[in-house]
Image (cartoon, rainbow, N blue to C red):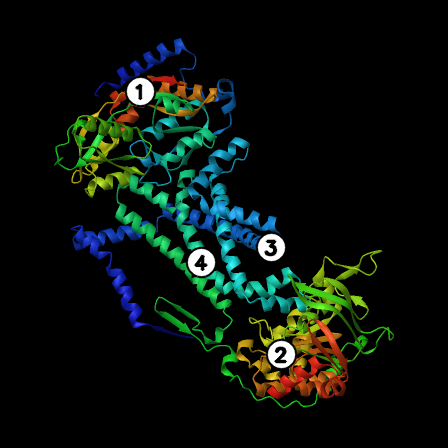
Amino acid sequence: MFIPRAIKLLLCAITVLLFSQGASAQSCEPSKVAQKYPSLAGKTIKIGVDPESPPYAFRDSKDLNKIIGADADMARAVFDCAGVKTEFFTAGWPGLLPALRAGQIDVMWDLLYYTPERAKETSFLTYMQAGTGGLVAAGNPKKIDDISKLCGLTVTAGIGTVELTMAQDQSAKCKAANKPEVTIMTSADIASGARLVASKRADVMMYDLALVDGLAKQNPQLYSRGFMVTSGMKIGVGVKKGNADMIAAVSDGLKIMQANQTQKKTFLQYGVDPSLEMPTALLTQ
Amino acid sequence: MTVRINPKAASTLCLLALLPWYPAMAADLDGVQALQGFKELIGYVGSPFLLGGAWVALKITLIAMSIGLVLGLGLALMRLSRFKTVNSAAWGYIWFVRGTPQLLQLVFIFDALPLIGLRFDEVTTAVVGFALNEAAFSAELFRAGILSVNRSQSTAAAALGMGPLLALRRIILPQSMRAVIPGLANDTIGMLKLTSIASVIFVNELTFRSQQVVGQNFKFFTVFGAAAVIYLFLTSAISLLQVWLERMFDHERDHKVSFSWFGLRASKSEARAADAPPDVKEPDVGNHAWISTLLPLESRTPRQPDEPFVACRNVWKSYGKREILRGVDLAIAHGEVVVILGPSGSGKSTLLKLINHLEPLDWGAIKVDSQYVGYREVPGGGGTVKPLHNLARARAEARVGMVFQHFNLFSHLSALDNIVEAQCQVYGVPRVEAQALGRELLKSVGLAAHADFLPHRLSGGQQQRVAIARALAIKPKLMLFDEPTSALDPELVGEVLGVMRGLADAGMTMIVVTHEIRFARDVADRVVFMDGGEVIEQGTPQQVIDNPAHERTRKFLNVVVNQT
């Protein structure tokens, strides 16, 4: 972390050089938006987020009208780079994907896990891999240190999330092993899921790792991280199928942000493990 | 205006304030922490971010409610229509909208309609969604309100020449509001809180915003507490509006406490009507000669002297399979007073209702002053008639006044306003002029001091005299009286008959259905006896009452005379 500034700059310069040789798109050229992404020129991009998901997208406590977070900051940086204006559109998480399909928002940029099912309607530009954390009561009194220990316990996860599916799979495994099944409670948002753990109505909340770690760090008297799972799931930006210019703009922007370390810095700033970053790829099915 | 604190309510308030302390104690918070929490809560109540969300919720509610009420009233009228298709269309809409989850409706409008090119932004979607929903719910409230108003009110309005829409606006709706307002207030409060489900379609309202703040700082007790305080403030405003509206539409207002909310009770001395005892002494008006001065000139000069003023020709009428009138022929001269006698069910009242076209006739024709009332002759149809489209206007032009057995005064209007209403709304008389005539008429029926009383403060006899004054205000050429004294206590009959006598003396053409044999004998130029839907015999009172030619007449008179 204590690399002298000159070396840092040099590294940056080398990386930029390396990439710019490969493709002309590998540097920010906001003024050339009309040539590079003609259909986006002059447009204000509607970024769909659920601002209840720290550290990815949440309200800035200093100015509640501002949305910050690892995803929100990255989205801003990528579209600044492309040369288009942005506007955050906020809704409950379950409303985001349908709105993207209907064209009410242009991108969904909020901890969206790639699944082949979702990719049928939405194109994904992945930028990190997922880690799932199990949030438990402070001190982990029930010694839940692995996902396999969930049999017979109560787990909460968000409606329509990948963690919910993981909990259901685990329940099936418990049943197959003749152990009591997992009781699953769905929660509408993260805060209400966390309250279930605090009030001991649920033993575990399964959610994104960074979020779970953040919660445990901010509220040590209430929560600990019981276990983590690296599922190999990928997280990406959702773009409506066939929106070529948008896909190109996000893809180019993400590559640049990864090359110039913006993504790593942003992740560090919000307590997301930078090692989760993975090279941008377009997944369409 | 006096304001006093109700000790009972004040202590309830204190108890309510203590309630939040309990969970605070249970959560092991000491006094300082709890106080800190309350300070934080107050801070969030003033947060522009949360207040902005409240404004979004309020804005959606106000606009959606306004649109929804207009649509709802339309739907309610469709539901009351006698046309089957219109009725079922409204029923189908209400059935569908009430029966499907509102969340799904919102998502459908926001996310599915863009596929067919209808793209609404989030606030518009919420307004449209909530308005369509409110239309369905308020339609049933309006329908209940309209049905709760006695049918006699619309009959009276129709007899005064008011069209259905005018009667709805001026007579039926004001009276139904009392039944409708509490339900509408419920709907408004419900909608304000329910706007939070619109967060799924990107509406950033109060609940969603407080969830976001909680998502960022996890202080759900203080943030949600603040949201609750803001909601309570808004819903209190709606409740106050409800109180105010209910007062406005309360037609017995002189009995009511004017304002009472949360133990704060303000009352003020009420309208002058309540101060005056209902039985104000009126100067005795024995001389009714004045009435002739009110009659329109043309009604005193017959234009076609050879034609009868009222001509009923072969009139048939049945309700379902029951025949009420079976070929009635009746001719009445200008200025004549005709009393129709007959047992109940003989078709007397129905005949009156056919004369001013309150009911359609099945066959035959009736002319008043040489004109059909709301009919036109079918060309080449040999005298058959067809009803006109604008019936209300035809009734107004015919100028036939009607007085009902149960008075049918508009119960939300004062005696004077009852008289002024049709003059202003139907005949376009300037209000000042109409009021002057109204006061003159009230004076002449002996009720000058009762002008500002609501009907429910008047005795039956007084109400019927106001009803006669109301009918006279439209300057009628013909007056119909449908058992005007049957609903009165015996001692009140005289005052009404006195007014009618004055009217007859003044030369008014009158058809009176009554059982008052003495009145018939003294006042009538001619008595008509009806039975079984037919005119059995007619002639001077001496002929029909004292020497009836027909057995049925004799029988009837025996019964009636022995009773009185």
**Left or right position of B369 against A1:** right
Measuring from the top left, give residue B80's x and y in whole percent.
57, 56
Q: Mark 3 or mark 2: which is in front?
A: 3
Tell me how many marks there are.
4
Q: Which mark is residue B185?
A: 4
Q: Judging from the image, what secondary structure is the residue with disc 3 in? A: loop
> Quick check: B561 above or below B424?
below
Q: Amino acid at mark 3?
A: Ser
Three-letter amino acid code at the position of disc 1: Gln
The answer to whether mark 2 and mark 4 are in CB contact below 8 A is no
The answer to whether marks 3 and 4 mark residues whose Cβ atoms lie closer than 8 Å is no
Image vertical order of residue B127 relative to residue B397, above or below:
above
- Measured along the vertical axis of the image, is residue B482 above or below residue B140? below
For marks 3 and 4, give the one nearer the viewer.
3
Q: Nearer the viewer, mark 1 or mark 2?
A: 2
Residue B472, above or below A64: below
Residue A276 x, y percent position in the rendering? 26, 21
The residue that mark 3 highlights is B81
Residue closest to the eye, A151 or B87: B87
| Distance between mark 1 and mark 2 Cα atoms | 91 Å
Amino acid residing under circle 2: Val
Nearer-N-terminus badge (2/4): 4
Crowd rating for badge 1 (residues with CA inside 10 Å; few <14, some 14–19, many 20+):
some
